[in-house]
Amino acid sequence: MSLKEALDSGLETVPGCRTICYVDMASGLVLGSASLARVRQEQFDRLAGAASALLHLPALSHLATRLGGARIAADAGLAQLTVARADELIVLARSPAYPEHALCYVCDSDADPAEVDRGIAEHKNKLADLI
Amino acid sequence: MALPDDILTLLARIEPLASEGARRSLPDTGREARLHVLVEMIGDTVLPRNLVFSAGKDMSCTLTVASGRLMRMSVTTPDGHQVLSAAAGATRDDQLAVLCEALAGLAEVEGALGLERQPLAEDVAAEEVGHGAGEIREMIESVNWFANATEAPRPVHDGAGAAFHASAHPFTLAQTLMSRAGVRIDATGAEDYQLPQAEGEALAATLAALPAEVRALLDPAAAIAIPGAALGDRGLLLALSADDLAVNVSEGDDLQELVRRWLATERTRGTGR
């Protein structure tokens, strides 16, 4: 399965998902993408920037450790988080195999958060050997 | 023979899991506010549950709830045990008044109330009609249940995040509400899970220092949900509005419920604009 096919499959697996991109957080490069409609490069760049900034943000890892009880290594950062906005749900998830790579899922805001989480877990499982 | 390190790590996590379980506490947010939270919990409970509240070792109160309706209420005190819905008056209105008075009594207990949610068999809802959250709310609003008491008013916050803050309350272990600069406005729930003033200010400063394109993603309002990294971890939801910043700590599936409620609040605000 190619990266493009793998990302395309996420559009079917994750409820309400309209865009997926796979980014290298270190360089900020978008390595691949899939979308139901045309998406401007600036929007992919914005997602790559958000993944890098938020998954690496020490203040959020500190909160997850202090209040959430998570055990996060000092420089590991968060594995996943969701940004909810009035018009969309954005899930930023680190690649299990390549921690400096992340998958960014953009879903409609009327998608159920629990179903989105389940769909993303299933999609990440499918991609485990690839990314 | 010593156990492998990974097994010991796993065992070390079991005790916190068992101690947290489905237990939590309902903070003392004031009688009126807590009474409304109790009614909201009834309305929000779809699958059959016993909501068991405890105060001290001798007093407990069990609400049997399903499909947003209060089916039964029983109270155990040092003087004995009473099932209120069966013992109350002949008419449904009489029963409702007794239940509302008892709910007000529960809301009035000083200090935090222990709370445990116990799943029940699916057929509970079919056994009894119960009283809907709407009619309970109507009844409690028609009578001053705390007429003989006075209460110090809680600080009122009517910022852009206030509606979500109130709506999220039943699904949190703790909430810390701050200004966008991190100045604490209110905090409820277990103190261990509240954010101290200094940490709130540091968090606010960090968020303000994010790159412009990331801040644009979080403006004018957004919620950041951070799931637990492992089973037993608590989930966090940071709610950012134009006026305030709130850190909500939840457990289990409640994090997803917080996201649902945040989106619902935004939809309501959107239609009201």
Image (cartoon, coloured by chain):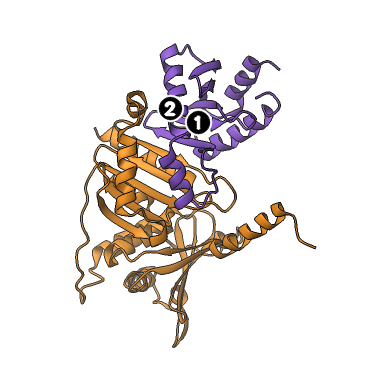
Kindly give the residue lying farthest to the bottom in the view shown. B79
Up the image or down, A106 lies above or below B59; here it is above
Marks 1 and 2, the one that precedes in the sequence: 2
Kindly give the residue lying farthest to the right in the view shown. B1
Chain B, colour shown? orange
Disc 2 residue crowd, few under 14, some 14–19, many 20+, Cα 10 Å? many
Residue type at tag 2: Ala
**Residue picked out by circle 1:** A92
The residue nearer to you, when weighing B41 against A34, is A34
Task: Supply the letter of whichever chain is purple.
Answer: A
**Residue picked out by circle 2:** A50
Q: Position of residue B132 (x, y in %)?
A: 41, 58
Disc 1 residue crowd, few under 14, some 14–19, many 20+, Cα 10 Å? many
Residue type at tag 1: Leu
The residue under the point 46% across, 13% down is A39
Q: Which chain hosts label 1?
A: A
**In this view of the protein, can residue A82 be seen by the observer?**
yes
SS of the residue under disc 2: helix
What is the distance, in whole Å, between disc 1 and disc 2 at their CAs?
8 Å
The residue nearer to you, when weighing B210 against A73, is A73
The residue under the point 24% across, 40% down is B243
The residue under the point 37% across, 27% down is B214
Please indicate whether residue B189 sits to the left or right of residue B82 in the image: left
Mark 1 and mark 2 in contact? Answer it, CB < 8 Å.
Answer: yes
Q: Position of residue B242 (x, y in %)?
A: 25, 37
